[in-house]
Image (cartoon, rainbow, N blue to C red):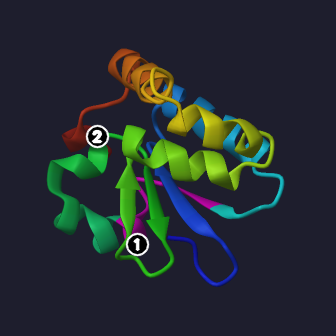
Amino acid sequence: MADERGRVELLFDGRCASCGAFASAVRMLDTERRIEFTPLQDAAARRRLEGRMGDAYWASFHLVGRDGRTVRSGADALPELAQLLPAVRPFAAALFRTPGLRRLPAAAYEAAAFARACALPHEHS
C-alpha cells in the first residue's frame, strides 16, 4: 500500500472531535513521517474516492496507498497502520497474529467508532 517512500495517506473526519483525536494520536506516533493526513472533507480527496466508495467514504478512517487504488478502512486498516508506527510496530506482529488477541484491536476500534459523535454524511458537504 505504501508508495516508493513508504508513505500512505490517512483520511479522517476533520469535523469530528473523536476522529481528530485519533488522527492526532497517530500523527504523534508517526515519528518516521510516513503518513499524510487528509480530512475527508478535502475536495481533492472527495473527488478521488467518495464516488468510488459511496457511503463507506464517511463511515470510518481510510488508509490510501499513493497509487490511489489501494484503500483499507477502519478496523481492516489497523494492522497496516500499526506497522507504520515505530512505537506500536514491535507489538503489532504478535497482537495481530495471536489467536484470541487478534480481534481485540478491531473490537476496540469498532466500540470507539460506534461511540463517536461525527456528523452525518450530508452534513459534510
Inspect the magenta stretch and tell me whether residue 43 lies in it: yes
Q: Position of residue 16 (x, y in %)?
A: 46, 32
Q: Number of labelled discs?
A: 2
Measuring from the top left, give residue 39's x and y in whole percent: 49, 52
**Most foreground residue, 40 or 81:** 81
Placement of 37 over or under 114, stated as above or below: below
Q: Residue at x 75, y 51 (%)?
A: 30
The quadrant holding residue 24 is top right
Residue for point 54% across, 63% down: 9
Secondary structure state at the residue bearing disc 2: loop
Earlier sequence position, callout 2 versus callout 1: 1
| Residue 59 marker | 2
Answer whether residue 2 is visible to the viewer in this image. Answer: yes
At label 2, the amino acid type is Ala
Q: Is residue 57 left or right of residue 1?
A: left
How far across and down, in percent of the image, does residue 13 sit? 44, 42
For the record, the magenta segment spans 36-45
* Amino acid type, label 1: Ala
Q: Secondary structure at mark 1?
A: helix
Figure check: 58 above or below 70: above
Is 43 positioned to the left or the right of 55 in the image? right
In which quarter of the view is residue 37 placed? bottom right
- Of residue 82 and residue 112, the one placed in the foreground of this image is 82
Q: Where is mark 1, residue-wise?
A: 44
